[in-house]
Image: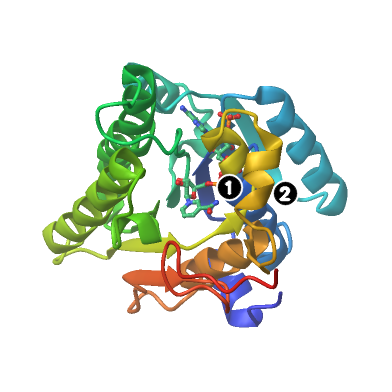
Amino acid sequence: MSYGPKAAERLANKIILITGASAGIGEATAKEFAAAADGNVKLILTARREDKLDELSQELKKTYPNIQIYTVGLDVSKTETIAPFLDSLPEDFADIDVLINNAGKAMGLDKVGEILDEDINAMFQTNVLGLIAMTQHVLKIFKKKNSGDIVNLGSIAGRDPYPGGSIYCATKSAVKFFSHSLRKELIDTKIRVFEVDPGNVETEFSNVRFKGDLERAKKVYEGTEPLYAPDIAEIIVFGCSRKQNTVIAETLVFSTNQAGPFHIHRNT
Ligand SMILES: NC(=O)c1ccc[n+]([C@@H]2O[C@H](COP(=O)([O-])OP(=O)(O)OC[C@H]3O[C@@H](n4cnc5c(N)ncnc54)[C@H](OP(=O)(O)O)[C@@H]3O)[C@@H](O)[C@H]2O)c1
């Protein structure tokens, strides 16, 4: 998608850090930033699967020979690794301009009383504590120059909780209120805080939620035309390429046939 010459100009030379860039929305967002700026950006791509990051980096470098990409294996749930990761960035990539807090997951659809401790921990550590730790550290860079964009991936789950989603919904409502508090704290700065709340997006999300049960994952989208990762990437890049005086503070994004977590029209 073209966001126009102004957008390319506004994005030019930006250093963009994306968490969870090895798949789904994070991967699509990397591609979308590259396209919108015609390769004239520096991407820091992080996730646990470094091989996927390398593949993405190679693909982007082939399409945009001028693009600069730094890939790092990073597990955001290990919050103690975040400051050392930022401190170890090469000089060319250290002065981050845009942070996309995208890494996240749902684990299972179990009801309270039956939820595994390890699933609770994985969701809170990644979706909430990892996102907060990353934001705290990157914010120091943004405050020094009084600019920077923070995009937090929330969810419809953070607005409209559903049975079986207690922990995931709690993590995403935490993201929502963290984002809103932060925006208020930064009211006298030029730092922008965006929250993007998707409905169903067909990515690896449900495979992860159902722990590799692909049949069950497929059923989530059966008979529907869901959102796809590039649809959300477009919204993120659109937001970050607006004029400095504009912040799209929050965005609820559904596919046309969805109106709530389970309010979905199915052609079955
Ligand atoms: N898909 C949806 O329906 C939907 C709806 C609303 C909101 N969201 C949110 O959108 C974001 C992206 O989801 P997605 O749909 O793109 O899911 P996805 O396809 O499963 O991708 C998730 C990404 O997060 C990374 N990740 C997971 N745990 C991580 C960790 N501990 N440390 C670092 N990276 C980690 C994964 O990479 P590695 O496995 O390589 O680490 C992967 O790159 C999440 O925050 C999710 O909650 C998704």
| Residue assigned mark 1 | 26
Instruction: Classify residue 50 by image quadrant.
Output: top right
- On screen, residue 132 versus residue 86, left or right, reads left
Check contact, mark 2 vs mark 1: CB within 8 A.
no
Q: Secondary structure at mark 1?
A: helix
Residue type at the position of mark 1: Gly
| Residue assigned mark 2 | 67
Crowdedness near tag 1: few (<14), some (14–19) or many (≥20) residues, C-alpha within 10 Å: many
The residue depicted at 35 percent of the width and 61 percent of the height is: 195
Q: Quadrant of the C terminus?
A: bottom right
Crowdedness near tag 2: few (<14), some (14–19) or many (≥20) residues, C-alpha within 10 Å: some
Residue type at the position of mark 2: Ile
CB at disc 1 and ligand 1 closer than 8 Å? yes
Is residue 134 shown to the viewer in this render? Answer: yes
Instruction: Classify residue 155 by image quadrant.
Output: bottom left
From the image, state whether disc 2 or disc 1 is nearer to you: 1
- On screen, residue 121 versus residue 45, left or right, reads left
Between residues 18 and 155, which one lies in front from this camera angle?
Answer: 155
Between residues 212 and 129, which one lies in front from this camera angle?
Answer: 212
Could you tell me residue 134's position as x and y percent? 34, 35
Could you tell me residue 76's position as x and y percent? 42, 28
Q: Earlier in the sequence, mark 2 or mark 1?
A: 1
The residue depicted at 57 percent of the width and 28 percent of the height is: 211
Position of 32 relative to 52 (above/below): below
Could you tell me residue 153's position as x and y percent? 41, 53
- On screen, residue 17 versus residue 63, left or right, reads left
Q: Quadrant of the N terminus?
A: bottom right
